[in-house]
Image: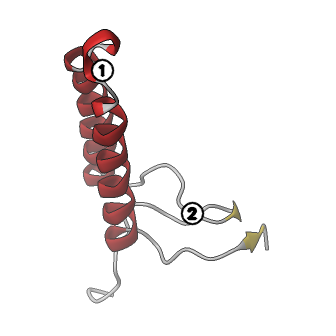
Amino acid sequence: MADEKKYWFPAKRYGWGWGLPTTWQGWLVILAFVMLMGAGGAYFRPQHANGYFLVYAGVLCVLLTLVCWLKGEPPRWRRGD
């Protein structure tokens, strides 16, 4: 039982990807993502950003996906079985 891996993000029941976190570490990752997106939105004002916010948001999304991939259940297509 001690070798059983605890996933931070379970696989979705339908489709491909991950669902809501099941551990406090997963919720902390989501909270950090939301806070960093909000901070980036406040820092990169639309009139001065010149597309920097899109790059910033893209990097954050890639990092979130990487964490989900490493700490989440292996993704696969599911039909609810």
Query: Mark 2: which amino acid?
Result: Gly
Q: 10 Å neighbourhood of mark 1: few (<14), some, or many (≥20)?
A: some
Q: Quadrant of residue 11?
A: bottom right
Q: Which residue is mark 1?
A: 41
Where is residue 79 drawn, in percent x and y?
Answer: 80, 69
Q: Position of residue 78 (x, y in %)?
A: 73, 72
How much space separates mark 2 and mark 1, taking CA atoms? 26 Å
Point out the residue furthest to the front here. Answer: 50
**Residue 7: x and y, percent?**
38, 69
Residue at 35% of width from left, 56% of height from top? 62
Q: Is residue 14 left or right of residue 68?
A: right
- Color scheme of the displayed model: secondary structure
Image: 27 above or below 75: above
Disc 1 residue type? Answer: Gly
**Left or right placement of residue 16 versus residue 9 in this view:** right
Question: Which dot, 2 or 1, sits closer to the camera?
Answer: 1
The one of 41 and 70 positioned closer to us in this rendering: 41
The residue lying at 28 percent from left, 32 percent from top is: 52
Residue at image location 30% in from the left, 46% down from the top: 60
Mark 2 element type: loop
Give the residue at mark 2. Answer: 17
Q: Is residue 25 above or below residue 79?
A: above
Label 1 element class: helix
Dot 2 or dot 1, earlier in sequence: 2
